[in-house]
Image: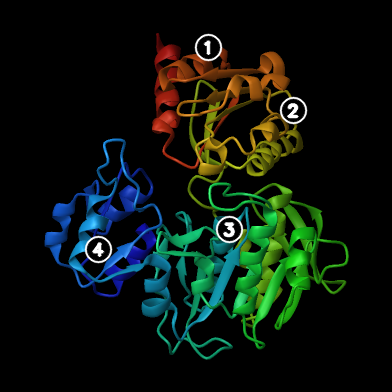
Amino acid sequence: MGGLAALAREAGHTVTGCDAGVYPPMSDQLRALGIELMEGFGADQLKLNPDVFVVGNVVSRARLPDGSPKFPLMEAILDSSARYTSGPQWLAEQVLHGRHVLAVAGTHGKTTTTSMLAWILEHAGLQPGFLVGGVPLNFGVSARLGGSPQTTSSSGGACFVIEADEYDTAFFDKRSKFVHYRPHTAVLNNLEFDHADIFDNLAAIERQFHHLIRTVPASGRVVYNGLEESLTRVLNAGCWSEMRSFGSAVSDYVADGDASEFDVQHNGQTVARVSWPLSGVHNQLNALAAIAAADHLGVPAMVAAEALSGFQNVKRRMEVRGTVARITIYDDFAHHPTAIRTTVDGLRHQLDRQGRSNERILAVFEPRSNTMKLGAMKAQLPWSLAQADLSFCHAAGLDWDAAAALAPLGNSVQVAHQLDELIHQVLAAAQPGDHILCMSNGGFGQVHQRLLNAISQKNSS
């Protein structure tokens, strides 16, 4: 929603917004754009009398224990018959129409792959518009309109790269958000069970992904991960577009070499070489997906690889927040067990490759997403943290026993229900040479800066 606000502002609209507990980097971006942000959802905001209220999917008709509405502004909008729409619907009508949309979907890697693809197209001179669920460091903003319709692509209009989420659109539109985007190029990175608060099982999510496939024209392209059985089922249900696969040994696009430096092969022929500062097989797959998608707009793999050599990743994706007393603290958005495992394993592989296998990884995380709060994947947490030397869980607000779920990790894990307690636990365990990896899809109480401050204070005393 912050990205949509930025696009609306760039298009010349006066924009205000409301939310609860906004945290960096989005709060900083909105402030820099001069977009007024009001705390809470008070009905008095109806007096702003905007042309339209754009409603995010956090808003609902929920009631508090005393029977009062959780979102009074929404009730006032409905009572007054004020004009409102969803974020994806506004985007489809006001921004995406007439453009070549490149939509990046998947359970993991959407933000990073969307950022890679936007940077490749920028490097190729296509001036893409984009909307990313994070802040790509190459651009410094999460969204922009991009070139005018005269900046042509293979579909005849300006190109726009969008992170395509399968979560539902709004309380009044339960379709997945990505159904609104009508992509000409669709990237399917991976697919596994998530969002247990709105989906009953993996089959329900696969159905939504097939709805996305149905919107891609015959002249379009579907780029998919050849390693994923779930995506194979989605495509077997019907695909009417050109298909390009990546990842598996028999895919159209294959990587040969270490994730930090590898050849890109297309149909068995080496067409480019990627050498970059990123690590992890997941990023290697993200790169292949972005290269295959950019090819649909005529960008050669060699040009895409050149762009990726200068790719700076995204804020909160293994972002180093600081080093104190030879202790490095990272911030990462990982929250699904698979993403947590991928992040921890990626850091472990990077340290091993650098000859620093003796340095410890301390995983500090909070199960904050709706899926994790429900406990739907608590049994996978020990597996996800297997490569960490020590783990620390912030268990505030959970209805399930985090200590019991993490018991298979034995003495290598500690659980805290208060953030101060968590910081004390980490501080007591940390030693020079450690890597403290903080993982959450929220602000995490600014635990990264608090740890840096606490370690600095401890070291100077």
Provide the residue designation for mark 1. Answer: 428
Upstream in the sequence, badge 3 or badge 1?
A: 3
What is the crowding at mark 2: few (fewer than 14 residues within 10 Å), some, or many (at least 20)?
few
Q: Which mark is residue 136?
A: none
275 on left or right of 428: right
Tell me the amino acid under the disc marked 4.
Answer: Leu
Residue 161 point in image, percent of width and height? 52, 71
> For the N terminus, which image quadrant?
bottom left
Provide the residue designation for mark 2. Answer: 357
Front tag of 4 and 1:
4
Whether pointer 4 and pointer 1 mark residues with C-beta atoms closer than 8 Å, the reply is: no
What is the crowding at mark 1: few (fewer than 14 residues within 10 Å), some, or many (at least 20)?
few
Q: Is residue 11 above or below residue 105?
A: below
Tell me the amino acid under the disc marked 3.
Answer: Lys
Q: Is residue 425 above or below residue 121?
A: above
Q: Which mark is residue 110?
A: 3
Residue 298 point in image, percent of width and height? 64, 83
362 on left or right of 126: right
Tell me the amino acid under the disc marked 1.
Answer: Ala
Identify which residue, 293 or 416, lies in the foreground: 416
For the residues labelled 4 and 1, the Cα–Cα distance comes to: 53 Å
150 on left or right of 307: left
Provide the residue designation for mark 4. Answer: 78
